Amino acid sequence: MKVIFDKLDNLSNYLPKPLYAQISKCLENINADSVDAKFDIDGENVFLRVMSYNTSLRENCAIEAHNQYIDIQSVLVGSEGIDIFERDRLKVKDEYSLDKDVVFFKTEDACPITRVSVDPGYFALIFPHEAHKPQVAVGDVPQAIKKFVIKVKLGVYEQL
């Protein structure tokens, strides 16, 4: 599969029904006023993080990937660019951290296969075989954003 970019209203089209039911119940309580925190959906199998930060110029953003979790990223306030890469074409910068489920890649000579601009009401669903560069300033204009990332353990997604 390749990254999925669509309206948040269509998320149910891409997730198994039991998983979508859990996630949609949690999303009912997530909005621009939500505090930056981790929200439990199904323990370490499925959880949501709300975070706020300033986007940066593309050259200042890191390329990362995960082995254990699928990311569903959406924005509550502002706009965020996310570049998507074929993971197997990248060179590792920092080795995989099992505790944080992240590996970072060198940005030199890295060419994205696509770029998306995530606005409120849209999402990007990113699989472990894809690397991504989040936090990119849309139109090269850094801005404060608030977003959420839903982490779904790969085994949970595949079982349902």
Image: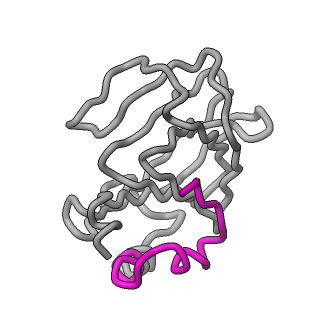
Q: Is residue 20 magenta?
A: yes
Residue 64: percent from left, percent from top: 46, 34
Image location (x, y in percent) of residue 121 = 64, 68
The answer to which of 95 and 133 lies nearer the viewer is 95
Q: Quadrant of residue 133?
A: top right
Q: Is residue 48 left or right of residue 143?
A: left
The residue stretch that appears in magenta: 1-23
Q: How many marks?
A: 0
- The chosen color scheme is one colour
**Which quadrant of the view contains residue 97?**
top left
Residue drawn at 40 percent across, 84 percent down: 17
Using residue 6 as the reference point, say whether residue 130 is left or right of it. Answer: left
Name the residue nearer the viewer: 143 or 156: 156
Residue 135 image point, x, y percent: 58, 38
- In the displayed structure, 100 sits above or below 78; it is above
Q: Is residue 138 left or right of residue 102?
A: right
| Residue drawn at 52 percent across, 40 percent down | 53
Check residue 18 for magenta coloring.
yes
- For residue 136, which quarter of the picture? top right
Check the image and name the residue furthest to the right.
Answer: 139
On screen, residue 142 above or below 7: above
